[in-house]
Image (cartoon, rainbow, N blue to C red):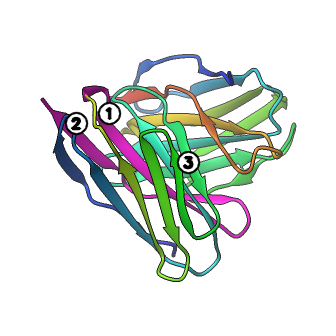
Amino acid sequence: GQNIDQPTEMTATEGAIVQINCTYQTSGFNGLFWYQQHAGEAPTFLSYNVLDGLEEKGRFSSFLSRSKGYSYLLLKELQMKDSASYLCAGVYNTDKLIFGTGTRLQVFP
Amino acid sequence: DVKVTQSSRYLVKRTGEKVFLECVQDMDHENMFWYRQDPGLGLRLIYFSYDVKMKEKGDIPEGYSVSREKKERFSLILESASTNQTSMYLCASRNTGTGNIQYFGAGTRLSVL
């Protein structure tokens, strides 16, 4: 299978930086998505990495290492509204998405 | 903005009932998907459709069927609902030109009693 592993829960303080890691199996891998999902709402697209390296988008950055089967989502200057679940999803065999179980992030004042 | 609309946010049904979950997207996307989301299991693909009248089984199709008569609408059907189908159901759509990005609806929380 194409196991996608990410931590179940994380906590952080407002204004801090948090890194959410995701590991995946590399066989058949084509790219990696990060989605944000607030409780009771639709997952919303954050980033899509195909090539190695860091992609920055405002307070959020996403990193990919294809050789290591590793990605992370970096959230800077945390705000209370960043409390949500963050879903890591690998693209396999051209276009099939395999999701991790999600990381529930709680931001405290 | 892409809009994916699921007809119901909450549904309560009885065991054995036939259940229809409806999903409509307004961006002329070719591809549409149905997932279920359960605690500790993440999103799992039930069925998907690459175009009108087309359907493909995902990872957990048992107990479900789908219908795609029009491009904008993708229906998930539980032929005879069972308690283990109590879950959050998420619909998504994708334009083949947008680099695999799937856009999700807000979900339908189904309880089967």
In the image, is residue A101 part of the stretch drawn in magenta?
A: yes
Q: Which residue is mark 3?
A: A47
The CA distance from mark 1 to mark 3 is: 15 Å
Residue at the spot 60% in from the left edge and 26% down from the top edge? B20
Q: Residue B59 placed where, x, y %?
A: 57, 59
Whether residue B84 can be seen here: no
Looking at the rendered structure, the kind of residue marked 3 is Ser
- Circle 3: element type: strand
Span of residues in magenta: A80-109
Expressed as whole percent of the image width and height from the top left, the position of residue A28 reads 64, 77
Closer to the camera in the image, A71 or B11 = A71
Where residue A46 appears, x then y in whole percent? 52, 42
- Name the mark nearer the viewer: 2 or 1: 2
Q: Which residue is mark 2?
A: A15
For mark 1, what is the residue? A82
Mark 1, residues whose alpha carbon is within 10 Å: few (<14), some, or many (≥20)?
some
